[in-house]
Amino acid sequence: MARRVVITGCGVVSAGGNELDAFWNSLVSGKTLIGVVTNFTCPEMDALTGAEAVLTADEFGMGLAEKDPVAGRCALLGLGAARRALAHAGLSAGDPALADAGVVFGSTMAEERQVSNLSERWVAQGADGVDGGFLTRADNHKLAACVADAFGMGGPVLLNATACSSGNASIAWGYDAVADGVADVMLAGGADTFTHSLFCGFSRMSALSKTVCKPFDKARDGVSFGEGAGMLVLEELAHAKARGARILAEVLGYGLSNDAYHVTAPEPNGAGFVRAIQQALTSSGTPAERVDYICAHGTGTQYNDQGEVRAMKAVFGERATRIPISSIKSTIGHTNGAAGAIAAIACVLSLDHQMVPPTANLAEPDPEFGMDFVMDRGRSATLSTCLNMSAGFGGANACLLLARVS
Amino acid sequence: MSQAPVAVTGVGVLTPLGDSVASLMEALSAGRSSVGSLTSPAVVAGSPMHDFEATRYANVRGMRIYNRATRLGICATRLALKDAGLEDAGYPAERLGVVMAGTFAHFDTLIEYDRSLVTQGPSRTNPALMPLAIPSAPGAVIALSFGAKACSITLADGGAGGLDAVGLGARLVRSGRVGACVVVSALAFFDELILSAARAGLLTAADDFRVFDRRSRGTAFGEAGAALVLESIADAKARGVKPKGLLLAQASTFCRSGEDLERALGRAASKSITASDTDLHTLGLCSSGANGTARVDGAEGRALLRVLDGSPNQPAVAAVKASLGESLDTAGLLQTIVAMAALSGSPAPAVLGLAEPIVPGLAYLSEATAIRGKRALVTATSQTGACSALVVGQGAER
């Protein structure tokens, strides 16, 4: 019988704040934190719109003085969230409980800023601009390795690059490692920052919102990016109890699927999402009726939101219209490979506060949908089980089921 | 904790020495090496695939715009699916998954796209290029090409990535989430890869490239594509397919602060041996990830010595990178394929050029040799300190 897996620590670095209380207050306020980006520019592009994280001095004081805070920002975001998650779980560097613990780090763009640096040098210097350290700096696995190295972790250390479902998928692998007995403790989540290809590429594909993203709104017109990181400490139930850890929530299970439909566009009928949700429910033995909050992927693009709602209706039937639904991307932006993990933390906090965060910027829900979108401000609710949905380029879907532990 | 065995029902391999298991093993048995001297962009040892033409192996939509690593991955996947009898067999798309081990598979596309942003500006870039420039793109494209709807996952664990991906794929099959899982990886050369590694002192001249030998001055990169199809033993049996080999257990570790790489790799190897309930006397082969650098070869050798200490009979030690070069994530799959072939009766290849072992005391193969044991240990490490080990067994009694 699989071991039960609980969450004993959460760490977040985002535009919504780097402490859980501040982050939660930002989410339930219903205000968007998407604005003009000041810490990053793109060649030939006007002022960028996004949700910036604020890195505190703590992030730079972890023996990382040699790290380039611009090019190495993704790693710093991840380290900041990891440090906070472990501290929240009552763990710190060198703790014996971490000796065989592992890391699953998710990222969409990962170390792309290192490539941007190289591109600028190549244009200026040609092949002479390629230095011997480039491969080491640009090796995406370094993101996971630097977290493990910072905290003395010697278990499986994986870099999961499964586009924007990476955060949820990383939690899924961490869940498996704990459930299967590979490790008693796993740190799982993701991080991403702003990159040139992100803004320029989405702009060229007309997928960036011209204002701010408005998930599920009739007038939704695309994505607004955010940067950030979310990390969760996953622990075997008995192990957590034995060391007196506070149990924040339980991971009931997960589901995966792939659209195999298009390199960028999601399957319009949401069939891939349907399979992922059903697998999460079936594999964890959770009746669909038990889901009482859906934290949607909700990017604010026409096709994502449409497919996602269709999937919810296909799985939950008429009841889908009565389940509270929200997307936090209009508050803190779409944080790509971190999005699923940060949303999972939002679910943990929702279960704790018995409240559903709203979807900021949602003024007039698309009449086609007819769902119970939480709008304006947080809504009190009796919550036992949350479904956290995420999807990525290429059609990779990952859904998590998280539950309150009494 | 024990792991239930998973069957390997299909193998696809593309290397400079052969595009099938039979041709590769024949070349390796004959003592051939594809490692020579590159002339561009640096004069270093390397093993390029000069004659690779993707359309000889597969013809999928969009092939022309995919980079070379993605094309290698697509072709290896097609060969593996065909070998497994799953090509055009009406296998349910919802049961077919893809796990890609690809740390650098997207890199040249990303570099091309990023450079075009600098030189041409965003408004003149090719919008189709950006989605192919993210790390998950090669795996996503492979899944799309073969209609794999169970999952599309990309791991980027460097040199340990291939074996980590095998472990993940096996876990997905074991849990029933995926019916048939393609684990695929590919490495293709691009200038920045070669130049950066050469300038870091990682690559050496062809004459100074030796594996497990203390005289070696570095490694040589090798282009390759490889794929395995994993299924449950019950599913393979139900389809009437004879497994090429069995994946018995995989384990991953990380070289934590203050720990030697050899100890971390030794932990991974011991865990995989324990989880597969393997008696050391049944171990016939160690298919090592040694690559010609002192750091990796020393760690691999000392880890094997540590793990095999007390073993009544020393298993043979092979290092396929001596013949094919270092293909990073892909290497773990190639090592696994060679180990399975050796367990099935092909001679295990010699460690070419080895005269003065960096770690004495192991049974390095000096010539291609038929092995006796029924199981093999496969080991790998990454530059970043990730370690991975896998125990494979015979697909059927010889």
Image (spheres, coloured by chain):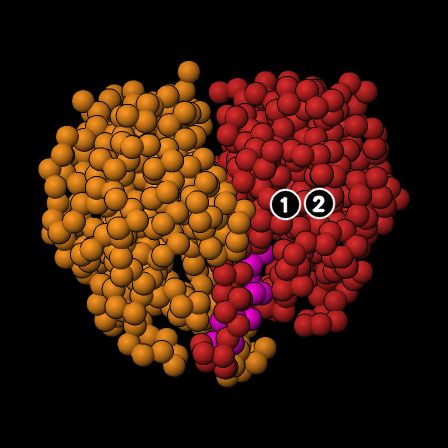
Residue B392 in which image quadrant: top right
The residue indicated by pointer 1 is: B146
Residue at 29 percent across and 60 percent down: it is A220
Q: Which chain is red?
A: B
Magenta region, residue range = B103-118
Q: Residues within 10 Å of mark 2 (few under 14, many from 20)?
A: many
Specify the colour of chain A: orange
Residue at 55 percent across and 35 percent down: it is B94
Q: Nearer the viewer, residue A243 or B147?
A: B147
Q: Label the magenta part by its dominant secondary structure.
A: helix
Q: Residue furthest bottom?
A: A124
Q: Secondary structure at mark 1?
A: loop
Q: Position of residue A381 (x, y in %)?
A: 13, 34
Lower sequence index among marks 1 and 2: 2
Q: Chain of mark 2?
A: B
Q: Amino acid at mark 1?
A: Phe
